[in-house]
Amino acid sequence: MFDSIIDRCGTASYKWDHYGAGVLPLWVADMDLASPPCVIQALTRRAAHGVFGYSNITDSLQNAVLVHLSSRYGWEVDPDWLVWLPGVIPGLNLACRAYAHRGETVMTLVPAYPPFLSAPRNQARHLHTVPLEWDGERWQIPLRTMEAAITPDTRVILLCSPHNPLGRVWSADQLAAVVDLCWNHKLILVSDEIHCDLVLDAVPHVPSAASSPHGAACVVTLMSPSKTFNLPGLNFAFAVIPDELLRQRFVAAGQGWLGLPGCFAVVGAEAAYREGAEWLAELLGYLRGNRDYLQEYIATSLPGVTMGHVEATYLAWLDARATGVAEPAAACLKAGAALSDGAAFGASAGFLRLNFGCPRSLLAEGLRRIGRALK
């Protein structure tokens, strides 16, 4: 079912209409795959009602979220811990505003999803970046470097788990070490776990807040069904904040900004969480196939390009420095393939992020264009 090509041109698609005709977009992180039939059916029924007024979070949606977190991660979440959001990016900005004052420091690890770099600056907070470490096989969290970088003004650490753009699934021990670091230095850890359902390897995703006994006291978790079920246009996410004081500060920072969720968001999110498990299992198998195809193609047909193993997400981080192409993102765009420039992620020149959440035939065509650009 995922091999079908759906024409998204002219649909006000940010991904497809940004560069226009003739460019195959492998950049922004939404999938070119239809959402689960259960979601489409639920939205169709809601549209047939004909009245699209203000909506509440229903008890049944709240229960669907809690059951999903319990059954998939063994994480027992109290409903009072939930704060509803229009997206994870607003959550990042709210957290910077809630837990750091103007001029105080927010730390994050690079390369990082660009809103990790912009959110602190949007809120007039100082951004301090710490490079992730490559050990020759996998990316690692540089705990000692992070601790050495903490200053009296540091208030927040932003963490991406699983990591975008590296596709890394952090282990329970790694996460616990970061949580304990925050606890020991009286910092707040904001853990963006929007890709947590998209683990491709036989490794578990562990919620940061559940990795350490201190997690409940110092971790704010951001989640959404948007990446998992390809629903970003519904604008729905939530924060899980066990500590009451942290939750109050977060909500206070959003006063006047956080409205009620849209009626389609409520219906779509519940259908996805309640009925989408079988579809998700099929999706993960398809994405594994795309990842393996991509990995093999790069190894055999793109000299000078390397790719770290993707454990989760549908995003690959490519190192094209050895090709000798000064601006690989621009070269690929000229050849008709749009990738994300690594510079936007806080990386040095020569890195690219590629989205392989698409029919395999589109991925194959995109790789042929990339090959023409970088050979």
Image (spheres, grey):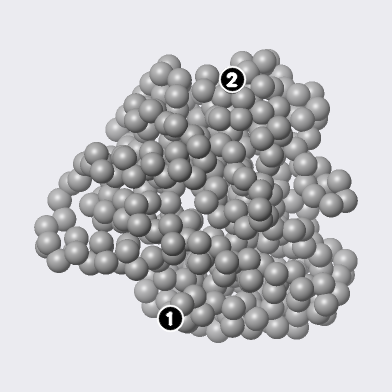
Q: Secondary structure at mark 1?
A: loop
Expressed as whole percent of the image width and height from the top left, the position of residue 279 reads: 44, 64
- Residue at the image point whose x is 75% and y is 83% from the top: 372
Would you call the spot at circle 2 few (<14 residues within 10 Å), some (14-19), or many (20 or more)? Answer: some
Sequence-wise first label, 2 or 1: 1
- Residue at the image point whose x is 63% and y is 66% from the top: 288
Q: Which residue is mark 1?
A: 7
Q: Which quadrant of the view contains residue 181?
A: top right
Q: Which amino acid type corresponds to the residue marked 1 in the rendered image?
A: Asp
- Residue at the image point whose x is 31% and y is 40% from the top: 63
Expressed as whole percent of the image width and height from the top left, the position of residue 152 reads: 68, 15
Q: Which residue is mark 2?
A: 214
Looking at the rendered image, the disc whose residue lies closer to the viewer, 2 or 1, is 2
Depicted 8 relative to depicted 90: above or below: below
Q: Secondary structure at mark 2?
A: loop
Q: Which amino acid type corresponds to the residue marked 2 in the rendered image?
A: His
Depicted 74 relative to depicted 368: above or below: above
